[in-house]
Image (cartoon, coloured by chain):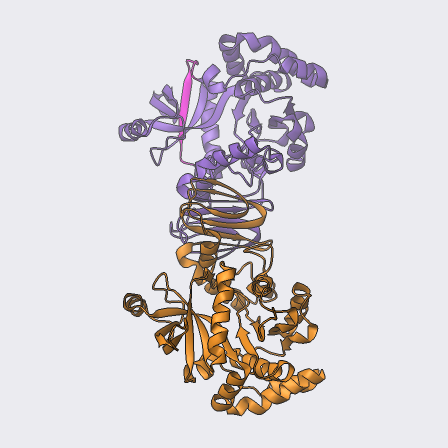
Chain colours: A orange, B purple
Amino acid sequence: MSKPNIAVVIPAGGGGTRLWPRSRQSTPKQFLDIVSRRTMLQETADRVEALIDPAQLFVITNARHVGPVREQLPEVPPENIVGEPQGRDSAPAIGLMAALIERVRGEDTVMVVLPADHVILRDKVFREIILEAAKAAEQGYLVTVGIHPTSPDTGFGYIQSAAPISDGSEALTVAQFREKPKREIAEEYLAQGGFYWNAGMFIATVKTLRALFQAHLPQSEAGFVAAAEALRAGDAEAFAEHFSTLEKISFDYAIAEKADKVAVVPADIGWNDVGSWTRLAEVLSHEKHVSENVVIGDHIGVDTTGSLIYSPHRLIATIGLEDIIVIDTPDATLICPKSRSEDVKQIVETLKARGAHDLL
Amino acid sequence: MSKPNIAVVIPAGGGGTRLWPRSRQSTPKQFLDIVSRRTMLQETADRVEALIDPAQLFVITNARHVGPVREQLPEVPPENIVGEPQGRDSAPAIGLMAALIERVRGEDTVMVVLPADHVILRDKVFREIILEAAKAAEQGYLVTVGIHPTSPDTGFGYIQSAAPISDGSEALTVAQFREKPKREIAEEYLAQGGFYWNAGMFIATVKTLRALFQAHLPQSEAGFVAAAEALRAGDAEAFAEHFSTLEKISFDYAIAEKADKVAVVPADIGWNDVGSWTRLAEVLSHEKHVSENVVIGDHIGVDTTGSLIYSPHRLIATIGLEDIIVIDTPDATLICPKSRSEDVKQIVETLKARGAHDLL
C-alpha cells in the first residue's frame, strides 16, 4: 500500500517558559523528555511514522535549534529541517513551508501541520483523524482538529461547528473561531454543545494553502516564493534576507479566521497541550486516582496527596502537602499549588528583570 | 578583676536529626552555622567568653566529633575536649566532667553546663543569670535556668518554682520537675503561674555535683574516677574501658529530680532550643512581621507568606505558599508546613529503613 500524499510539517519554534525551571530558552519543552523517554518532538514524529516516510516529514524551528532537531530526528533528511533566522509567528512559518513543499512535492500534497509540544495519548485514533481530515482537505477545505472540551477551560481557543461538510463526513463546517473566552462564556459553550478546543493543528492541500496566503497575505507572497527558492538553492544569506520581509502575524488571525471553506474534525485522542505543569500532571496522572502523587525521580512523602513531584537528580521529602507541584532542576526549584502553575510566568519575568540569564 | 572560679562544660554529643536535611549524623546541628556565621557550638562558647578564660571551657562530645570541635574552638586547650567512645546519655557525661574538673580545677569550681545547640539572643542578660546562678550554686544548690513560657508548649519539660532560696535572691527553690506535659496540663501550668521551661542548663559546684553522683548513682562512682584519671594520664584505651562501665541514664532522671537542694533562676534571655525547623524560623523571624518570609539564600516568591526558605546553593521559586518550610541541600530538599516540621523524624526513619546512609 502506497503512503498517502501527505507532508507533515512540525513547527518547533516555541520558546516555552511555561514549564520553567525544566524548560529554558535554550531547551523549550518540545526538546524535553519529561513525559516519556522520547522528547515531545520525537513523539510527534513517532506518531505519524506509520503514515509517512521520513522524507515526508518537515520541521521548521529557530535557527539555533536546527542542531538539536537533527540530533533528535536523524531519519529526517537535513534539507527538510528549516531554521528561521528569527521567530516571526506562525503565518510566515506555514506560508514558507507551503511554498517550499509546493516546489519539492507538488501542490496536491496534503500538508498536515502538527505542533511539536502537545501530548496525544491515542496515537492510532489520531492517525485515523488525520486521514479523515486529509479527505476533507482534498475537497478544498482548510481543516482543523477539534478536541471535545472536558471543562470550561479559558486557556484555549474554541471552534464552533455547524453541519457536516457532506453527508456521512466526520468533518463539520466551522461556523466561527472563538478566542480564549471568559469563564462564563466557556460555560455557555459547553452547555450549548458543538464547540471544540482548537488544538492548533491544520490540514489542507498545498494548493489550498497557497491560494489562501495569496488572497489574505499578498504582501508576503513574493517573500514566500523567494525564501523557498533560496532554501532549495542552499543560499542561507538570501533566505535570511527574504525571510525577514515576511509579515509577523499568526496563522489563525491572518488565514484561518478569514478562510471560507473551513472544517473541523472532532477528535477524542487524549490530547493535552502541556501548557503548564498542572496540565502536565493531568497527562502523567492518567489512570491514577486523583489523590495519588505523580512522581518522577526520588520522593518520600508523609501524608502528601495529589501532588506532582519532578526531581530526577535529588531526593524531595514532603510532609502534609496537598495538590502541590515541585519541580527540581540542578540550579532552580519551583514550588507552587496546582491552581497557580500558570503564574510561573511571573517568576520568569522576575528573572528577566534581574538579568538572570543563566536561569532563563 | 579576676574571672570567677567557673568551668563551663558544653555537652556537644547530640545526634540531631530534627533539622534534617541540613543536619546529618556526620554534622549534627551544634556544628552548623544556620543562625549566624558562627556555628551553634561557637556561639555557645562566644557567649561565655566575657566570663571565663579559654582554659575554663570544656567540651564533651562524641569521639568522632573531637576533630570538628578542635577546629571550631581552636582557643580551647585540646585536653579540655573530651571524646566519648560512645553516646551514653547525659549523666555519664556530666559525672565524668565533674570528676575531671575536681582534679584539674578543684572542688570549689562552679561547673556551668550549657547545651551546645540552643539559641540565646540576649547574651548580656544570660551572663548575669549565670552569675546569679553561680551565687546560689556556692550555697550548695543545684541550679537550673527557667525560661518564662510564652505558650503551652508540649515539647519542653517544666520546672515548678516555690519561694526564693533566701530573701532578695533571684533564685527560687524548685518544687518539682515536670516531664513534657499534655496540652491541657501545659495550659494549666501557664494559668497557674510559677512554671518555667527547663532549658537544660545546670549550675553547681563540683563538690555539690560529686556528692549528688555519689549519693544517687553510686554504681558509676568508681568509673567516673578511673575514667577521669585515665583522661589526665592520656590513656585512651583505659579511658574507653572505664567509660563503658558508666550507667546509661539522663542527668535529669538520675540526679536533678532526686536532689534536695535544687533552685531555678527565671530567665528572659531570648532562648530557643531550635528543636525543629519551625522553632528555628521563630528565631530567624525575630523582629519580623509574622507574614514575612524568612529567607536564607536565593528566593523568588509570588504571594508567598510566613514561610522559611533555606537554600544557600540554588534558587527556590515559590507561588502562593503560606507558612511553609523549604530546606534545600545539595542532595535533598524538605518541604512541609510549619505545623508539621516535627514530623521530619518520619522522613529520617524512612531513610533508615531504606538504608540510605548517604542521606542520613
**Quadrant housing the C terminus of chain A:** bottom right
Question: Where on the picture, by quarter, is residue B116?
Answer: top right
Q: Is the residue A103 above or below the residue A65 in the image?
A: below
Question: Does the magenta portion include B262?
Answer: yes
Tell me if B236 is positioned left or right of B199 in this view.
right
Q: Is the residue B223 above or below the residue B88 in the image?
A: above
Tell me if A17 is positioned left or right of A166 in this view.
right
Q: In the image, what residue occupies the spot 40% across and 67% down?
A: A155
Q: In the image, what residue occupies the spot 58% across and 39% down?
A: B32
Q: Nearer the viewer, residue A35 or A193?
A: A193
Percent x, y of residue A33: 58, 57
**Is residue B285 visible to the viewer in this orientation of the structure?**
no
Tell me if A102 is positioned left or right of B202 in this view.
right
Question: Where on the picture, by quarter, is residue B105?
Answer: top right
Q: In the image, what residue occupies the spot 52% across and 32% down?
A: B349
Q: Nearer the viewer, residue B299 or B107?
A: B299
Q: Is the residue A289 above or below the residue A111 in the image?
A: above
Percent x, y of residue A305: 42, 44
**Is residue B160 visible to the viewer in this orientation of the structure?**
yes
Percent x, y of residue B308: 46, 48
Q: Nearer the viewer, residue B230 or A24?
A: A24
Q: Which residues are magenta?
A: B257-269
